Image: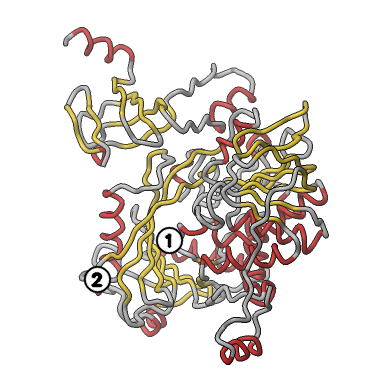
Amino acid sequence: MTRFSAWNVIRNGFSGQQGWSRQWRDPEPRAEYDAIIVGAGLHGLATAYYLAKNHGISRIAVLEKGWLGGGNAGRNTTIVRSNYMMPGNREFYEHSLKLWEELSHELNYNVMFSQRAHVSLFHSPGARDAAARRYNSMRLTGSDGELWDLDTLKHEIPHLDYNNARFPIIGAAVQRRAGTARHDAVAWGYARAADALGVDIIQNCEVTGVRRDGARIVGVDTSRGPIDGKKIGFAVAGNSSRLWQMAGLGRLPIESHKLQAFVSEPLKPLLDQVVVFGVGGAHFYISQSDKGGMVFGGDIDWYKSYAQRGNLPIVQDTAEAAMSILPCLGRVRLLRHWSGVMDMSMDGSPFICKTPLDNLYLNAGWNYGGFKASPASGWYFADLIANDRPHEVIANHDLQRFERGVNIDERGAGPDPKLHG
Amino acid sequence: MIRIPCPFCGERDHSEFSYGGDGSIEYPELDAPAEQWHDAIFLRENIRGMQTETWQHSSGCRLWLLVERDTMTHEIRSVRAAHDGIARAMEASR
């Protein structure tokens, strides 16, 4: 594999771009691996990369039923932030943001991480107090956060609707280090870097069965034959329950819901930040991609679904929210919209944990928040698999936390998955 | 748009309804052991396929309904009032 560097770009510029090699191999599956990760999304690929890089495990396979990065890795709004407050989440997402800041160098692949600031609007003194508490917690725990008053906000983003009589904007909570990244590049970057460390990424390889020997997992049956693994990790958010039941493990604290997102036709530079609007039942987040498209999304579709297609009432909701804060978008045409299947968990927080089977590990329950989490998710999941014990940061990201009464409920919405948007 | 045939109002857009959740959950007795309550509140079958779920016709007759719906195709197989007594009364009056 050719390393990306300024020198190689110049050299290939003079030699007809003939000096590049393919980015990752297309290996045949072996009969046995030291570690198997099911799911070549961002989390699975990151896990394989850190298993090889941080823990020196050499024989690793990542199994993917379709093509890598073809699930929720390609169905998100690419927002990266760490404005979480609950113990566990706070350290976890801050670690993730720090990994993002170095990710392009780490992977020798430009993931186009753009720290353009995440601006969360508030509309009442109560909301401002809540934001102050949250963002002060962030500042006290090694992150950044600030409150913008109305004058600052108007100066930074002059074209929001400041004349909304029902929900007047009075300021914003801002994390400047937050931003967006190029979602495909993250999948490709991790795949390429993992492959360079010897990881076999096996695409078009659907897991069809799980073979067990009592309290151990032996291997998986796949559409490309049986593959054994000394340690196996599931990273298939959206379909975690199905794989879990395939392993004969019963029920998970997860429901699969779908979330829609949208991109408009490309526009000239319009919005420099990620802007979030959420009040009175509305929920809306928007940024502008490097190609100029306005990328935005809203709430989940409310009813449980495994279908990767969305419904029209949410399109209307999202469009109404867009018009509430950015009326200048009124005549912009929608280019595409899509829907991804989310593992919505009972408290809105994920699981990176051991399972009832000795050598099976679970990475699931990412709700809306999987994209930003992927570097840390891979990091801690690899650490769990390699050392067979959870890192202290993810000590409460296990399936037993509800039994212990330790819900990591960032929104305080209670045990109803559809409310953890 | 999913169209839900409400047994009282007729077929309507799903946007008239509020989604409840998994309708197959049976809650234990109040004094049942904590594990039983844990399982009922926190664990889900999360079926891909036909599942029973609750919806309320919140912008219509406000009846709570038990709906059999496919979570992959969104096809609806059956709808009836969630309250047994109401369901029986509606059956009888057909």
Residue A314 in view in this figure: yes
Percent of width and height locating residue A168: 30, 68
Q: Residue at x 49, y 47 (%)?
A: A342
| Left or right relative to B62: residue A30 | right
Residue sitting at 31 percent across and 24 percent down? B77
Q: Residues within 10 Å of mark 1 (few under 14, many from 20)?
A: few
Q: Which mark is residue A333?
A: none
Q: Which sits in the foreground, A102 or A232?
A: A232
Q: Amino acid at mark 1?
A: Gly
Q: Quadrant of residue A245?
A: top right
Residue B16 sits above or below residue A16 on the image? above
Residue A87 shows up from this direction: no
Give the image location of residue A346, x and y in percent: 54, 40
Whether marks 2 and 1 lie on the same chain: yes
Residue at 49% x, 61% y: name it: A130
Q: CA distance from mark 2 to mark 1?
A: 34 Å
Q: Position of residue A219 (x, y in %)?
A: 72, 37
Residue position marked by numbered label 1 in the rendering? A126
Dot 1: element: helix
Q: Residue furthest top?
A: B92
The scheme the figure's colours follow is: secondary structure
Q: Is residue A187 left or right of residue A282?
A: right
The answer to which quarter of the image holds residue B34 is top right
Return the residue at label 2.
A332
A392 or A127, nearer to the observer: A392
A126 vs A375, nearest the viewer: A375
Q: Amino acid at mark 2?
A: Val
Give the percent coordinates (x, y) of residue A30. 74, 47
Q: Secondary structure at mark 2?
A: loop
Tell us which disc is closer to us: 2 or 1.
2
Please state the chain letter of the residue tagged with numbered disc 2 in the rendered image. A
Q: Identify the image quadrant of residue B62.
A: top left
